[in-house]
Amino acid sequence: MGVRLGSPMGRWVRVLASTAFVLPLILAFHWGQQGWRDHHYNYPSRPDGYTQLVNRFGQPCNEAARAISMSWRADDNGQTYTFRFHKKLGGYRTEMVPNKGGTSTNLDNDVYGHIQNNHLQKYVDHGIYGYACRLKRNGSTYSTHAFGVAIDVSSAEEYMGKCTSTVNTYHASIWKNHNWYWGLAFCDPMHFQYVTGY
Amino acid sequence: MSKRTKTVLAGIALGLITSALMTATAMTAPEPQPYGEPIGPRVPRDTGAGELLLVVVGGVYPTRAEAEAANAQIVFGDLQGYYVVPVAQFQGFREQVGGAEEFALASAFRTQEGAEEFTLLAEVFGHPATILPERVRSLGGVFAGLGQEPHPDGSGPLLGPVPESLP
């Protein structure tokens, strides 16, 4: 069945088509329009090695390592993941983040905000987690997750052992610009950590 | 060169050497450690022998080979997941699970908080995780994951018994 554009139904088709085109653009820019900005406030310097990591962020599994929580929706399955991380890496009050008792704006305002504002949320897939008081897989040393200084994003797609990246590569530069080290260097493309040499 | 000049030059040289030594010492001094000495990156393979532990179970299997094959499929990203343990190393385990299987995928904890944290982590990955309703007595055996839960005082990992885990 054809629809003539001059007919009443044709007008509706044009309205719907316009809405379908314009609405995503409006929504996509809402993050910046709502007042988000990168504060880059009070980032700790990135430790190198185990001793510096402990000196700066405390022992593994300590209270501060799991003090701040945030939620992040995966784009591919629509599931919202709530995870925790170190109080030095976020939780400071901004236009978009309530005061959670944290001391910087790094993760939940700046990194997350850039990803939203740059329309890169579509490259955040399911499997998102942060703090976990666990050892490294098949290892006997604490994971960086136990210090609350590591976030895994798109874990199913960007699985450990894969030495290329298909989705996180689109926002990895944002993490790097905010002091995070990307695990692609050791074939763990889901992994971003705020420490080197460990 | 007069004796007085030599004395002055010697004094200046001594001062320079002393300040250089002090600077070098300051530059190489260890960072202050506000959180105490690092406990060491390696976790002791503590089995909690004799203690009453909480166990999170991911499945039970007739043989070790089957349990290990299943465990290879239950991946927690880059984190350690379950351990393959003989059912018999926990007194009271079989009574709670039933069946005649000899091996389990399990992770042991001393606190309820630790067990629940791990269960939530398993949920994120869509893996099965059940906390046994009753604590079981560890008879030693293989490492089942102790040391991977926060100490109740918030200082770091729990590396020893708590009142609830003592018989």
Image (cartoon, coloured by chain):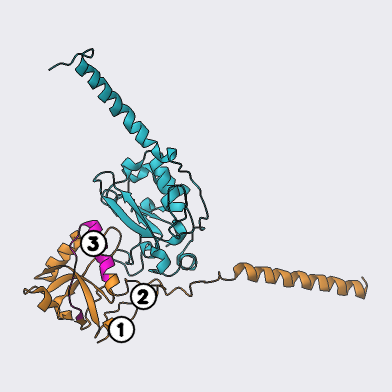
Chain colours: A cyan, B orange
Q: Is residue B42 above or below residue B163?
A: above
Counting residues from the N terminus, which is met first, the one under dot 1 or under dot 3?
A: 3
User: Hey, what amino acid is under mark 3?
Assistant: Ala
Chain containing mark 2: B
The residue that mark 3 highlights is B122
Counting residues from the N terminus, which is met first, the one under dot 2 or under dot 1?
A: 2
The magenta span reads B115-136
Counting residues from the N terminus, which is met first, the one under dot 2 or under dot 3?
A: 3
* SS label for mark 3: helix
User: Hey, what amino acid is under mark 2?
Assistant: Pro
Residue in view at x 22 percent, y 67 percent? B82
Locate the C terminus of chain B by quadrant.
bottom left
Residue in view at x 32 percent, y 74 percent? B147
Q: Which mark is residue B152?
A: 2
Chain containing mark 3: B
Q: Give A32 or B33, whichever is nearer the viewer.
A: A32
* SS label for mark 2: loop
* SS label for mark 1: helix
